[in-house]
Amino acid sequence: MAQVSELDLVDISWPINLLTCSRRVDMMMPGERLAVSLKNTDTIDSLVALLKTMPDIDYHVRKDAACFLLTIEKHPGS
């Protein structure tokens, strides 16, 4: 089963939340999943734009009552 890590950036302001998430994605191991919680819509938009450029990454965004939930997975064998 893939390792799942959590990153809570709900109370972290821009641009620190964007930089923290970007750095954490860069450190992901193949097959790893990262669950990120964020509030800022602009940060989600920026992260999605960044993730679209990464061919070895899959992601899914979901809006919860309190925040956005971004699930990121690095392809196994990447």
Image: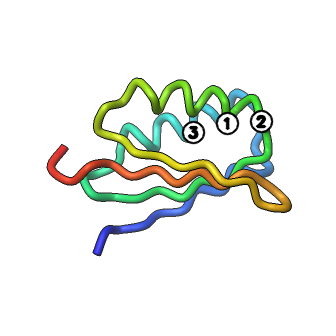
Instruction: From the top left corner, tell me how far across and down residue 15 is, in percent.
Output: 70, 27
* Helix, strand or loop status at disc 3: helix
Q: Are marks 1 and 3 in contact (CB under 8 Å)?
A: no
Residue at 39% across / 52% down in the picture?
73
Task: Give the residue drawn at x 42%, y 67%.
Answer: 4
Q: Are marks 2 and 1 in contact (CB under 8 Å)?
A: yes
Q: Compared to 42, does 57 lie above or below?
A: below
**Residue 48 location, quadrant:** top right
Which residue type does callout 2 highlight? Thr
The residue positioned 36% from the left and 41% from the top of the image is 57
Give the spatial CA distance, label 2 vs label 3.
16 Å
- The residue at which mark 2 appears reads as 41
Image color mode: rainbow
Residue 42 in percent (x, y) is at: 75, 29
The residue that label 3 is drawn on is 20
**Residue under numbered circle 1:** 44
Q: Residues within 10 Å of mark 2 (few under 14, many from 20)?
A: few
6 left or right, relative to 46: left
Q: Residues within 10 Å of mark 1 (few under 14, many from 20)?
A: some
- The amino acid type, in three-letter code, at marker 3 is Thr
Residue 28 x %, y %: 35, 48
Mark in front: 2 vs 3 = 2
Farthest residue, direction left? 77
| x, y percent for residue 58 | 40, 45
Image depth: mark 1 or mark 3 in front: 1
Q: Residue at x 58, y 32 (%)?
A: 47
Q: Determine the CA span between mark 2 and mark 1.
A: 5 Å
- From the image, which quarter does the C terminus lie in? top left
Q: Earlier in the sequence, mark 2 or mark 3?
A: 3
